[in-house]
Image: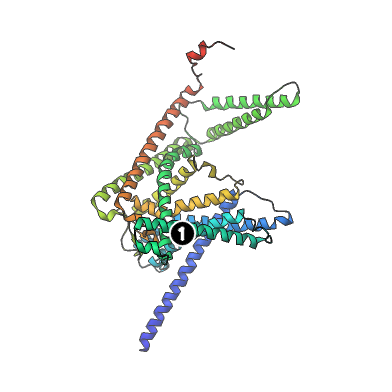
Amino acid sequence: MASAEQDALALREQLFHERVRECIICTLLFTSLYILCHFIITHFKKHTDFAAEHDNEDAAVNRIALGLCTFTLAVALGAVLLLPFSIISNEVLLSFPRNYYIQWLNGSLVHGLWNLVFLFSNLSLVFLMPFVYFFTESEGFAGSKKGIMARVYETSVVLLLLLLLVLGMVWVASAIMCNDSASRQSLYDLWEYYLPYLYSCISLFGVLLLLLCTPFGLSTMFTVMGQLLVKPWLLEDLDEQLSCTRLEEAAVSRRICSDKASCWLNLDVELLQEQLFAIRTKRRKLELRHQASPWQRNLGYPLAMLGLLALTGTSVLIVCFHVLELLLDDAAMPRGIQDASLGQVSFSIFGSFGAAFQVVLILYLMVSSIVGFYSSPLFTRLLPVRQDTPLTKIIGNCVSLLVLSSALPVFSRTLGITRFDLLGDFGRFNWLGNFYIVFLYNMGFVALTTLCLIKRVSWAVQAELIRTFGLHKLPLPVPCSRCLTKPC
């Protein structure tokens, strides 16, 4: 009897130590992400001087808002790394099943990370980010004493009214969709049904946003990479272009100096200064291309473009193969599991190499979706600027990135990029079991990506040929109708 009690006590102690160890690991991981996101937000936020005494309240509000925005951005970054971390953990446990130094890496830890990311995503989207926005815009109720608490009271009331409105809309939508008398009569299952239903709608919006942004981003990545790397010299004389640009810069500089020195000349100095800035920018780009080594110029650019083309083509082929699997096998449908059994089987038929390639593809698709999001005409204004991004724009960026990143695991599993099943509440979304939604989503991704690539590649080849052969310098033909018109 005593030995049985000792075994039960030892088991409870072991469970307690494992839980404490998981809490410490999760805290360290989130602290690292929070510090990294703090530096990112500090790099982009606009500097505000709160020197006066009456601005202490605004400074405190600013610090609180930036802290909550950093928390939200850390959750978004954690959601991006969630699926790659799980895949890598599974491969590490497969390669070293009995290693003493990686016993802390287990299914319980991974499952806990998925639950924490889901919880913090809900908390940030539903409560924190609306609170931050209303908190920065509030001034306190009329007639109340000014201060931080007055703003907190006003923000809490406005947020409560907004939550009641949103929950009422979710209740009505679920009652219409389910057509169930119980769902129309009570709100007792608020936590178990309505909040997951609300997040299911948000996740569906995020997945649809990824469907629109990722194909556009995959085609835009070639342009972005072309701007970052040095292009090779093909049928162009870079020395002549550089000398012409320097002469043009000197001529514009002399015109500006002559206008400042003489009062008889009537020149638009602002227009000349803008022209001088554009010419200097062009001259710096040409100097960078001229100073680049032949290896960087003739090998780096082609290899980068081939790498992008290989990743894009592979992702499209994987999705096409997944479409065929959906038609032939029900097991290809995305599903959720509650128990993370890691270290038993690889999630790729190519073993560790295939799993590593899946991680690269997932991160590449996420980067492409962000590039496509900020390149689209609807969200171009949200693009942050270094040391010149106001607080409201930071809030908008944090919300947008959280919506995109929290939908990344569902997006990757729906397209068949990975075989890793969705853990925790990520697999409880209502629309995941609908074959028609999943099938049309895969077909839409393939169609949009193909169209965007064909359009971007055709336009890029045409523009490059025109620039290489110097056709852009030719004068435009004058229409005959314009020639026949009489001068005024």
Can residue 257 be seen at all in this image of the molecule?
yes
Can the viewer see residue 34? no
Residue at (27% x, 50% y) in the render: 326
Give left or right: position of 137 versus 96: right
Quarter that holds the C terminus:
top right
Is residue 252 left or right of 224 when viewed as pictured?
Answer: right
How many numbered tags mark residues here?
A: 1
Residue, disc 1: 167
In front: 393, or 6? Answer: 393
Question: Which residue shows up at 40% across the image and 48% down it?
Answer: 208
Specify the quadrant of the image occupied by residue 106.
Answer: bottom left
Q: Residue 231, position in %: x, y?
A: 48, 34
In the image shown, does 195 or 404 lie closer to the viewer? 195
Query: How many other residues sit within 10 Å of disc 1, few (<14), some (14-19) or many (≥20)?
Result: some
The residue that appears at 76% across and 23% down in the rendered structure is 263
Please state which of residues 426 and 274 is positioned toward the viewer in this rendering: 426
Question: Could you say whether the residue bearing mark 1 is in a helix, strand or loop?
Answer: helix
Position of residue 91 measured from the top left corner of the image (x, y, whole percent): 36, 59
Residue type indicated by callout 1: Leu
Where does the image place residue 305, in percent across and percent down from the top left?
42, 39
x%, y% of residue 379?
50, 43
